[in-house]
Amino acid sequence: MRCDKLDGKTCLDIYLAKFESCAKYNDWTAKEKAVHLKSALTGNAANLLQGNTRATYSEVVGLLQRRYGNREQHEKFKLELKYRRRRPAEDIQSLAQEVESLVNRAYPRAPADMRETLSIDYFIDALDDPPLQCRLREKEPHTLNEAVSTAVRLETIVLSTLRSQKTPRKQLRAVKADETDDGQKRSSHHPSPKSAGKSTLANRGKFSPKKAAAVETRDTPCPSRTTAATARDLPAS
């Protein structure tokens, strides 16, 4: 079994606990533990070996604790907890896991029940969603796992409700658009009374040659009738 690498970014207490388990499984001596721990250091953590290449296992652990130990970074972890907020697209489970890790590193000597309460409070604050936070506090979760499951359920309900509200609106807009298009098509096929009247008046002066001749004949007085009328009107001689 091989131990993991340590670059100074992971929790030191967790790493040392895993390293001790690996050393016990492999039955390493104190000298072998020092060799394996030194070879596992990478990045900034490896810089601690400068001038300390002959350090024993306990001395290397002391160097790591002074640089990366929780005791020296309690205030740093407390500030991270205070200003930790949910990132875009971050799931609730990942947020809760990081908050719990920060609480354990910021308050390592606090009782377990106190760390549980702190984890719940910091987790709700980190959600950064006032409506969800209020509803979650009303549920009064007793454990962090209970708070996480409740938050996931409440968020799922809200998202499903929003989706169901958006769908009818989209369908209604589509129906209105179709009705508008149909009305425009009908108006284009059936002209309005004003436009129909204008076209009728404009076409009244347009006749075919036969119709024009018939109109001219009807409007021109007959010569014989005119002569007869004139003869009747003259006095008898």
Image: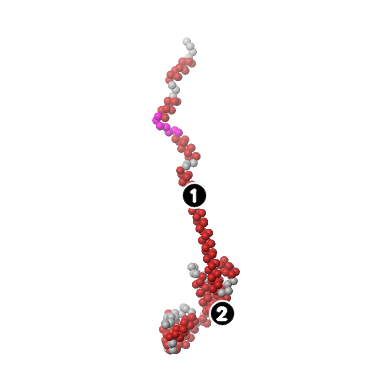
Find the residue positioned furthest to the left: 209
The stretch of residues the image draws in magenta is 204-210
Image: 187 above or below 77: above
Image: 89 above or below 206: below
- N-term mark: 2 or 1: 2
Q: Residue at x 44, y 87 (%)?
A: 27
Find the residue positioned furthest to the top: 237
Q: The disc labelled 2 sits on which kind of residue?
A: Ala
Please name the residue that numbered disc 1 is placed on: 179
- Between residue 112 and residue 214, name the one nearer to us: 112
Q: Residues within 10 Å of mark 2 (few under 14, many from 20)?
A: few
Numbered tag placed on residue 199 in the rendering: none
- For the N terminus, the image quarter is bottom left
Q: Residue 121: image x %, image y %?
A: 57, 73
Image: 196 above or below 156: above
Find the residue positioned furthest to the front: 25
Q: Is residue 111 left or right of residue 235?
A: right
Q: Residue 154: image x %, image y %?
A: 55, 67
Q: Residue at x 58, y 67 (%)?
A: 135
Q: Residue 73: image x %, image y %?
A: 52, 80
Please name the residue that numbered disc 2 is placed on: 112
State whether residue 52 appears in this view: no
- Between residue 56 and residue 25, name the one nearer to us: 25
Q: Residue at x 43, y 28 (%)?
A: 215
The Cα–Cα distance between marks 2 and 1, rounded to whole angstroms, is 65 Å
Examine the image and state in which quarter residue 137 appears: bottom right
Q: Residue at x 41, y 28 (%)?
A: 213
Q: The disc labelled 1 sits on which kind of residue?
A: Glu
Residue 181 is one of the magenta-drawn residues? no
